[in-house]
Amino acid sequence: MAGSSDKIVVSTYTNGILDPEGPMLGPVRDGGIVEATTAPGCWGPMITPHLRGGHEVTQPVAVENAEPGDAVAIRIHEITVVSAATASGQDRMVDGHFVGDPFVAKQCPECGIMHPESTVEGIGQDAIRCANCGTPLTPFQFEHGYTVVFDEARTIGVTIDKDGAERIAGDTRTYAGLSESCTQHSILLFAPHDLVGTISRMRPFMGQLGTTPAVRMPDSHNAGDFGVFLIGAPHDYALTEQQLEMRTDGHMDIDAVRPGTIVVAPVKVPGAGIYMGDMHALQGDGEIAGHTMDVAGTITLQVNIIKNRPLEGPVIFPLLEDLPYLARPIGAEERKRAQVMAQKWGLSGLEESAPISIVGTGADLNKATENGLRRAAEILHMSIPEVRNRATINGAIEIGRLPGVIQVTFLAPLSNLDKAGFLPYVQEQYGIA
């Protein structure tokens, strides 16, 4: 690629489909900066019939000289929430309003048009209607939902009552902070209000951050759990099991993917195609309700190529405070006490180690864990039993999202991290010499 830039600014989105043949912005140079304005994920795109992926992620950015078989290190510098309010909750699917998959293949139940254009009439769960025949056509409604407003500092959220939710529903684009190029209907239109007066702490992160898969697929299905719904599906985005292996697991919903974190993502298409979206104001591990507080915002990140570092899925170097207790670096005083024990028992030395977190995905948590353990073993040149032991005594299996996104996080020997090409990142992130 030629004509790379030191900085790329992104303000355009896909229609929910990640396509390795699709256009990319850039390229940005190796070491360059990407700034993006992101659109809310999940609920807004879920109720917008013409969007086909469950999210509305940014147009991918090419990285100069990134080739399949490389990896790209993404340093998250800043995340800022723009939305002043959002709505979310437990969903229920509406039969007859989709073909096989309500995230991907929305259909008007009356005139049968796939991915129809839509209009808004009033507020509430029947507000979005087919532009062709006027029929309410959202494929999702709330089983139990809430509307939340944020303070100006974006540190606290408070859920509001019916009057407040309906007032906000009258001016959704302003409260949601939707950019001009964002085409989704805001979920604030539904004005849910089953939770009132509940306080929550904000800690924003990116639900989607990664690279373009080597096969065309809906953005929210770029992971091993949602991706299984594409296998043999009755719509245009059906995949085989083998094609699903071409994913990059960019849809993680892992709350550690926040400012200060380094995400190392696989490169599976020329240029890598870095994309982002589905910013969350907060989330408890597991995202047990299926959805959290999706918001619009801005993100600044820096990208660096790691040549000849093939990966199946992401590797994360979280902030120290986000690491499980047992996976935090061994401190100087702890090492001194361990050295006393080593001398007492005639050991010649003690292992030097540092944290690493490998993402695993699968149809359920067991399969995701198996996937993560295997990836960790291959990356770090260990057996799976050794990874199991290390994750037990020096780490944890953390749940990003149900049904099947996990992190295998543990202290790994520096020698193995060095061989894997990750020693510079643990030195940078954790101050290890």
Image (tube, helix red, strand yellow):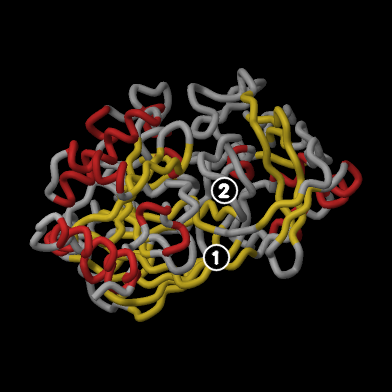
Q: In the figure, 365 relative to 184: above or below? A: above
**Can you identify the residue that label 2 sits on?**
41
Position in image of residue 127 (x %, y %):
77, 36
Q: CA distance from mark 1 to mark 2?
A: 13 Å
For the point 38% across and 68% down, which residue is it?
75
Point out the image quarter for the C terminus.
Answer: bottom left
Q: Which mark is residue 130?
A: none
Q: Quarter of the image holding residue 219?
A: top left
Q: In the figure, 16 relative to 335: above or below? A: above
Question: What is the three-letter code of the residue carrying label 1?
Answer: Thr
Q: In the figure, 253 relative to 78: above or below? A: above
Q: Residue furthest front?
A: 344
The reply to whether residue 133 is visible in this rendering is: no
- Counting other residues with Cα less than 10 Å from the Cα at mark 2, is it few (<14), some (14-19), or many (20 or more)? many
Q: In the figure, 334 relative to 402: above or below? A: below
Position in image of residue 376 (x %, y %):
23, 46
Q: For this rendering, which residue is in front, 227 or 12?
A: 227
Please indicate whether residue 49 sits to the left or right of residue 319 in the image. Answer: right
For the point 59% across and 40% down, which residue is it?
291
Q: Quarter of the image holding residue 192?
A: top right
For the point 44% across and 69% down, which residue is it?
260
Position in image of residue 226 (x %, y %):
42, 33
**Can you identify the residue that label 1 sits on?**
37
The reply to whether residue 211 is visible in this rendering is: yes
For the point 12% across and 63% down, which residue is it?
349
- Counting other residues with Cα less than 10 Å from the Cα at mark 1, is it few (<14), some (14-19), or many (20 or more)? many
Position in image of residue 111 (x %, y %):
64, 23
Point out the image quarter for the N terminus.
Answer: bottom left
Q: For this rendering, which residue is in front, 76 or 106?
A: 76
Helix, strand or loop status at disc 2: loop
Helix, strand or loop status at disc 1: strand
Q: Total of numbered circles in the picture?
A: 2
